Amino acid sequence: MSERRFSGNFDRLRDPSSVKMMAMDDIIAAVMEGTELESMLDVGTGTAVFAEHFQKAGVGTVAGVDVNPEMLEAAKGYLPESEFKVGPAEALPWEDCSFDLVFMGFVFHEVDDYVKTLQEAARVGKKLVAVLEFPKIEQPFGPPLDHRLDAQQVVDFGMQAGLGEAKIVELEHLVVYLWEKLR
């Protein structure tokens, strides 16, 4: 198991102050701007916080994948009608072009192979790949600085994965990287 993977208390992922700090409306607006999304895969879904908020924002079908089966049990409690599978970001257990959006919220810095992860996201995605991460600056929350990626690294990984140029949206405490796909 990667030392970068979240191993804390699951309840912390849904703590109201943490969710407020994320500015969920800003994240969803940045991702969905100008794009109609009918389905999304939440990679590293944890307790499905992002999947739940995207569904509330109008995405009809949400699904999630995580390496931790205990997290998925918690996720099913919040979204019992959604499909959740155990699996790594580098080998997503879905067919090609299964989702309009493949979203990775605070998980990209945890994966073992950044390029393979983005290639897999592109494989199962149809319209959009989105990565939400903390900027590589000291902050009183989020992963340690040495676990964070700088913007140029993320952009370079997207280029290596064949996704092309990323659109970068800087939020107050977070960064969203977007790659549009044409299919």
Image: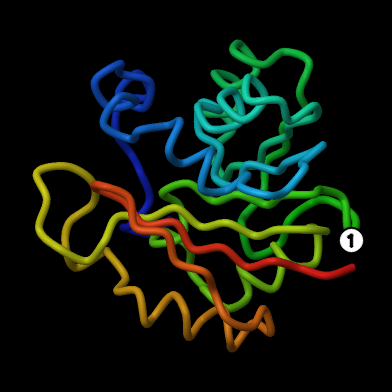
Name the residue located 31 percent from the left edge and 51 percent from the top edge. 174
Q: Image quadrant of residue 147?
A: bottom left
Residue 171 lies, in percent from the top left, at 32, 50
Badge 1: few (under 14), some or many (20 or more) residues near its Cα, within 10 Å? some
Q: Image quadrant of residue 51?
A: top right
Q: Is residue 166 above or below residue 111?
A: below
Horizontally, is 8 left or right of 45 in the view? left
**Residue designated by label 1:** 96
Horizontally, is 153 left or right of 172 in the view? right
Q: Is residue 28 above or below residue 160?
A: above
Instruction: Give SS at disc 1.
Output: loop
Residue with the most extreme front position? 34
- How many labels sit on residues? 1
Q: Image quadrant of residue 60?
A: top right
- Residue in the foreground of this view, choosing between 146 and 88: 146
Residue 52 lies, in percent from the top left, at 59, 23
Name the residue located 79 percent from the left edge and 51 percent from the top edge. 93
Q: Amino acid at mark 1?
A: Asp
Residue 100 lies, in percent from the top left, at 79, 49
Name the residue located 16 percent from the left edge and 63 percent from the top edge. 145
Instruction: Indicate the quadrant containing the C terminus: top left, top right, bottom left or bottom right.
Output: bottom right
Residue 124 lies, in percent from the top left, at 80, 58
